[in-house]
Amino acid sequence: MSEEMDRALTQEEREFVVAHLATNRDRMLAAIDSLTQAQWNFKPDADTWSVAECCEHVVLLECMILRSVQEAPELAELPDVAGKEQIILQRVPSAKRKVTAPEFARPNGRWVGGDDLTGAFASARQASIEFAAGSRDPLRWKVAPHFLLGLLDGYQWLIFLGSHCERHICQVEAVKARPDFPGKSFPS
């Protein structure tokens, strides 16, 4: 077995991360399907992101993180990042702890409408899935820092993408569940 294969993801890791990314892609697409422009842009209050803002943030991070993983240099020694997969899977999807997004990842209306955002999300996530499924890069040997979680390897960053999306799916669903969400009808 070559050293290149030793450093590539195992088949089990690859299958897990691809399924994780695909599941959250499907959930996000279902959550944002058929929304009107008023629904996309509805903000319950000044501190809560609209559906459009949540999606824009997810797309921005998806593109930036994938590029960072692809471009990260391979380390000579394996960093100590063991066990962070479970932390990512358990903590990142939960919106119980409010996290302020870094300035570069904050939404600012880069996409005009829901169709544009849906397409941007689907395209960005597809690129992540294809990379996770086919990359022979030594992802466990490529690391980059997360502002709260510390060093994560490339595999952990791909898991983060799915879990981060899950966090914002929950936010989208919470906005849509509000009684003042546009187009909500109530039984009389």
Image (spheres, grey):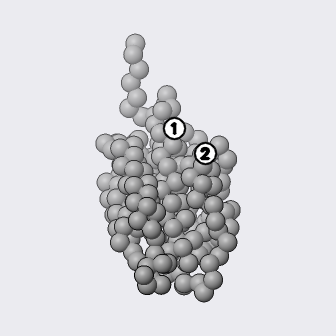
Query: Left or right: 87 with respect to 16?
Result: right
Q: Which residue is mark 2?
A: 95
Residue type marked 2: Ala
Which residue is at the front of the view, 70 or 170? Answer: 70
Query: Left or right: 172 with respect to 79?
Result: left
Residue 39: name its quadrant.
Answer: top left
Look at 47% across and 39% down and name the residue there. Answer: 173
Where does the image place residue 32, in percent across and percent down from the top left? 38, 45
Quadrant assignment for the C terminus:
top left
Look at 48% across and 78% down and name the residue there. Answer: 6
> Label 2's element?
loop
Nearer to us of marks 1 and 2 is: 2
Where does the image place residue 83, in percent across and percent down from the top left? 63, 61
Q: Residue furthest front?
A: 1
Quadrant assignment for the N terminus:
bottom left
Q: Are marks 1 and 2 in contact (CB under 8 Å)?
A: yes
Within 10 angstroms of label 2, few (less than 14), some, or many (20 or more) residues? few
Which residue is at the front of the view, 18 or 150? Answer: 18
Residue 187: name its quadrant.
Answer: top left
Evaluate whether residue 116 shows in this view. Answer: no
> Label 1's element?
helix
Q: Is 76 above or below relative to 11?
A: below
Residue type marked 1: Ala
Evaluate whether residue 186 shows in this view. Answer: yes
Look at 41% across and 20% down and name the residue there. Answer: 186
Q: Determine which of the numbered discs, if any, sits on residue 174 in the image.
A: 1
Marks 1/2: CA–CA distance: 11 Å
Look at 60% across and 54% down and name the residue there. Answer: 86
